[in-house]
Amino acid sequence: QVQVVESGGGVVQPGRSLRLSCAASGFTFSSSGIHWVRQAPDKGLEWVAVISHDGNSKYYADSVKGRFTISRDNSRNTLYLQMNTLRAEDTAVYYCAHPSPDDDYARGGLDVWGPGTKVTVSS
Amino acid sequence: QSVLTQPPSASGTPGQRVTISCSGSSSSIGGNTVIWYQQLPGTAPKLLIYKNNQRPSGVPDRFSGSKSGTSASLAISGLQSEDEADYYCAAWDDSLNGYVFGTGTEVTVL
C-alpha cells in the first residue's frame, strides 16, 4: 500500500528556517518523482515544488523560489523540504504527494497524499 | 497565485447533475492535461480525474471530466450527499514552469 507521511512541522518565527520530511513506503521511492503542496488556513491548494526520481530535476513555485529547497534521500525513502527565511504567508498545512504511475510525474495527477504537517510562522 | 479560475460555489439537489468549470490559458490547460481533485472537510485531497477524463480505480463513474481549448469541466451526475466537498482543477503551466491549482469550488448538496 502506497503511503507517504509528513513530519517536521511546528511554530517558527519569521525569518527562521524549518525542514520538513516525508517518509514514503509501499512503492519504489527511487523510481518516483514526488511533490510538495501546501494549503493555508481556509484557503485553496498551492503547489510548492516537485523533484524527479533521481533528484536531477526540480521545479518550484515562484512564491518559494530562492527560499525553499526540495531534496530527497533515496537510501532512506525520504523527501525533504528545507524552508528558509520563512514568512507569515508560509503558514499552511504542507502535504507531500505521490504522482500517479499512469501519468507524468511532474505534470500529471497526484494519487497519494499524506495527512499533512502544519507549519505556523509567527512571532 | 492561481492561474486557473473556477466558480467559488456550485450546488444541486440529490440526483441532479452539477458541472464545475475551470478556465486557464494556452500555457496551462491549452497545452497540458487537466486534473481534478476532491477535498472533503478536514482531509487531504483525493485524485478524481487525470489526463482530462481518466478516472483512477475506485472513483465512481458519476464523475467525468472534459477539456476544450483552454477550459475544462468536471461533471458530477446523480449528486449524492457525500459529494459535498471542495473541488480543484489543476494543470502544468509552461510559462510558469510549474503546477497550478484552480481557485477551488465548494459543492453543496441542498
Image: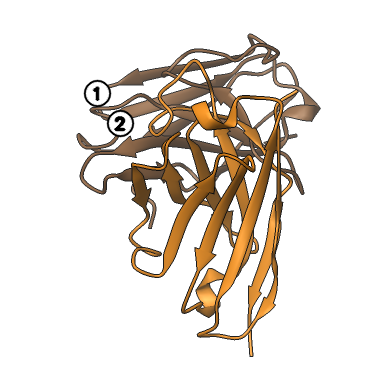
Chain colours: A orange, B brown
Q: Chain of mark 2?
A: B
Disc number for residue B52: none
Q: Residue at point 26% right, 49% down? A: B96
Residue A56: give x, y in percent of width and height: 35, 42
Provide the residue designation for mark 2: B29
In the figure, residue B12 lies in which quadrant?
Answer: top right
Q: Is residue A67 above or below residue B80?
A: below
Q: Is residue A101 left or right of residue A118?
A: left
Circles 1 and 2 in contact, beta carbons < 8 Å: yes
First in residue order: circle 1 vs circle 2: 2
From the viewer's perspective, is residue A118 above or below residue A122?
A: above
Q: Quadrant of the N terminus of chain A?
A: top right
Q: Residue furthest right?
A: B81
Residue A94 lies left or right of residue B100; in this view the side is right
Quick one: SS at disc 1?
A: loop
Can residue A57 be seen from the camera position used here?
Answer: yes
Looking at the picture, how far across and down is residue B41, in whole percent? 75, 46
Q: Quadrant of the C terminus of chain A?
A: bottom right
